[in-house]
Amino acid sequence: MLKCLVVILLLFTYTKLLAQPKTTQAVQVTQAPRIDGSLDDSVWLQAPEAIDFITNTPVYGKPATVKTSVRVLYDNNAIYIGAYLYDDSAAIRRQYTPRDNLQQANVDYFSVFLDTYKDRQNAFQFLVTARNVQTDARVSANYTGNEGMYGDAGWDAVWESKVGFRSDGWVVEMRIPLFSIRFSRKTTADWGIQFMRFSRRLNETSFWNPVNPAVSGFANQFGDIVGLNKLVPPLRLSFSPYVSGGYRQTPHNNSVQQYETLKSGGMDVKYGLNESFTLDATLIPDFGQVVSDNVINNISPFEIRFRENRPFFTEGTELFNKAGIFYSRRIGKTPDKYDTLQDMVNAGRLDGYQLLKNPSVTRLYNAVKFSGRTAGNLGIGIFNAVTENVKATLRNRGTGKDSMVTTEPLANYNIIVLDQALKNRSYITFTNTNVLRNGQERDANVTALDVALYDKANRYGLVVKPRYSLVYDGPGRYNGFANNLQAGKVSGNLQFSYTNELRTAQYDPNDLGFQSSPNAFSNTGTVSYNIYQATPSFLNQSYSLSVHRDYLFKPFTYQKTAFEAYTSWLFKNFWSLTLTADIAPWWYNDFFEMQTPTSLFQTPRQPLKRAPYYNLFIEGNTDNRRSLIISWLIGGAEGPLPNDPYYGFQLAIRYRFSDKLMLEMSYKRQHDNGQYGYAFVRDPVTGAPLLARRVYADVTAIFSGVYNFTSRMNLTFRARHYWNRLQNTNLFTIQEDGYWKARYDLMPGKYDINYNAFNLDVFYTWDFRLGSRLIIGWKNWLGKDYEYTLPANTYKYYTTNARQLFNTPHGNEFTIRFIYFLNYQQLKGGNKRS
């Protein structure tokens, strides 16, 4: 009897995983409905309803608490979505938000997803909030959902929406022009479709076709749409010309203020070469109005990865990012020799010369993206960008003659991607990146192959990702290889996986990609168990355990063994709690701490012995439906060495004053009484790097807010102060066995570091018509030459640094930017609403 029950249970689970998708029908109309948020046009009644939504979170598998009805129409120009979201009108949450930014907002929303190639991996998302704020995204196979978004929100399309309110709910009407999506020309279109609704009052996400969180993947859980007959892809041609101007004042430590008048103009062009492929080009781009980076004092040998904020590089780049070897911040970066030249001037090593000009940004001449997908689900992407030859200007104080020094050569960046979608969510992707620099400068080529295979039931998966790099550096060359292998059970409440990571000593994708360090071989095993059904205490739960064992690849040497446990609970009152434990129970080898970024590709001579540690962190969030939201984290670490406790905590408070105004403050602090790391000084005799034991203090304070005047107009600001202090207490020499020997002949306090960074970003944004925008910006920052100027022995505490911060010279930049969207239909006097 027990065996029979087990078999029945397994069959039931298998059936649920392979449940047939729902189907809805689109109806062709000759008279398009008015997009006014009323659903009053009788033409809507021609289409059948898509109803019976199923919950996804906080509990999976139940009928949605509130009813939703969706209808789909189309004509030769657009797809029309009409949704009636039933609810108590007084209970509908209606907070204003900026476009593409939900961020735990107190607002209800509705979204439609279109899988126009029905590859069950890629899709277009269009989302509308109850305040008619739009969000759109490109869904891809590797993206996981977050805050209503299931794709790359950097993609922006031009489409139309309106919302309206009734006594028994609210209404959404959408008009999605055919030129805003891509699809193949077929007599009868075969698309996947999905509808999503989120109710903030209930904190409930529901889908028309059930989306099981225990099943791997998202687009593979869409429903189907029929009735789309003889859709003809339109000519997709649009222009976004822009003009911008402004003023910048930059301080320097020689008391000289540098003043610049900023002016530029350019254009973004999108041209549909056929029904599936689009050419995107940006001509003479200006990326001045982007959010400042979260700069820190990087005391590690590894590069810090910053977020991409430039629109051209965030929009429609999911295909180029799939392999993970494209880091767009390489394009238009700070010139390679900028800091070297600036440091030489500051250190007095250019005696007799005055540095007149040293550009800090490499200008982008132009960039082009070609991408799309064939009827056979082959994605093709080609990317090209050209950056300028950057030169600094030096003046001989004696002769008055100026000379030019190249700090970054003319460079050409290229990417080619072939991405074949296969059955059962499987795919194979080929990616090649190539960087060519002028003259005898460094060139690089990286090739990646990604293969993902899943069984028919989507329960087990195998992913293999080999890579090869070839770098020409002056007269020499070197190459390297890397591979990532993952295998395991990817669906179900119980999941497990094995991961092997290999990077040879000279695998180097960093000319157009990002890699912290080469020369690694690691094995990781993970098992997790997730409960998506409510219990008496919790709405859902998650548990996982991982084991890591790391080696240096060349010479093959043991490095570290670590264990990590993770648990997360969502309570019935929508408070959440997470516990994370990270343990390295044995002494281990650190081969990279005493190196510099330029020496990472050299074979390490000796390790640094690290002590065992035991970390525990607890974090939580209050109910995000409330006006006051509090997030917190507290944790600590301990090891066998005396007097070296570590603690960290973080507190974030967000308050919604109204549906238009929201402010947030956050404070994060880390303190380590006995941190061991590179002292940034070398032995005066041998030249070997010295190790420091130090008191480490690190603080980040952020104050931000947004005021939304309307659904298309807002004012945002963000002020960030970062402080880091390294107070050395001892210096050591590293011995051959990796252990350290005290140096009493050197003064450790001489090498203390006190670092401050400050940024203020204020932006007024007005989307005055579809695709067109006016942006006014003010940026304020602590001058780069002043980041280290406050003495470490005087300014020992965060408060004293914060007070002195405003007595230190700052830079300022004021800009205004005007973007106007034009498409072919408008230019020829056709469809006025496009």
Image (cartoon, grey):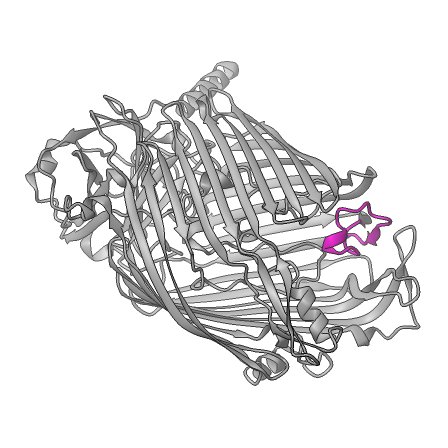
Please state the horizontal and vertical placement of residue 274, each as a whole percent of the image.
32, 32
**Residue 542 sits above or below residue 9 on the image:** below
Please state the horizontal and vertical placement of residue 290, each as a whole percent of the image.
45, 62
Asked which quadrant contains residue 450, the reply is top right
Determine if the magenta segment contains residue 346: no
Task: Identify which residue is drawn at 30% across, 38% down.
Answer: 181
Asked which quadrant contains residue 210, the reply is top left
Task: Identify which residue is drawn at 69% across, 54% down.
Answer: 302
Task: Identify which residue is drawn at 92% across, 55% down.
Answer: 735
The number of discs equals 0
Please state the horizontal and vertical placement of residue 424, each as a whole percent of the image.
45, 23
Horizontally, residue 763 falls left or right of residue 3, namely: left
Secondary structure, magenta segment, majority class: loop
Horizontally, residue 767 falls left or right of residue 566, namely: left
In depth, the one of 359 and 572 nearer the eye is 359
Horizontally, residue 524 falls left or right of residue 382, namely: right
Task: Identify which residue is drawn at 88% across, 65% down.
Answer: 683
Region in magenta? 590-613
Query: Can residue 479 be seen from the camera position used here?
Result: yes
Query: Can residue 143 be seen from the camera position used here?
Result: no
In depth, the one of 327 and 479 nearer the eye is 479
Determine if the magenta segment contains residue 602: yes
**Residue 548 sits above or below residue 131 on the image:** above
In depth, the one of 755 and 314 nearer the eye is 314
**Residue 802 sits above or below residue 734 on the image:** below
Please state the horizontal and vertical placement of residue 653, each as a whole percent of the image.
46, 67
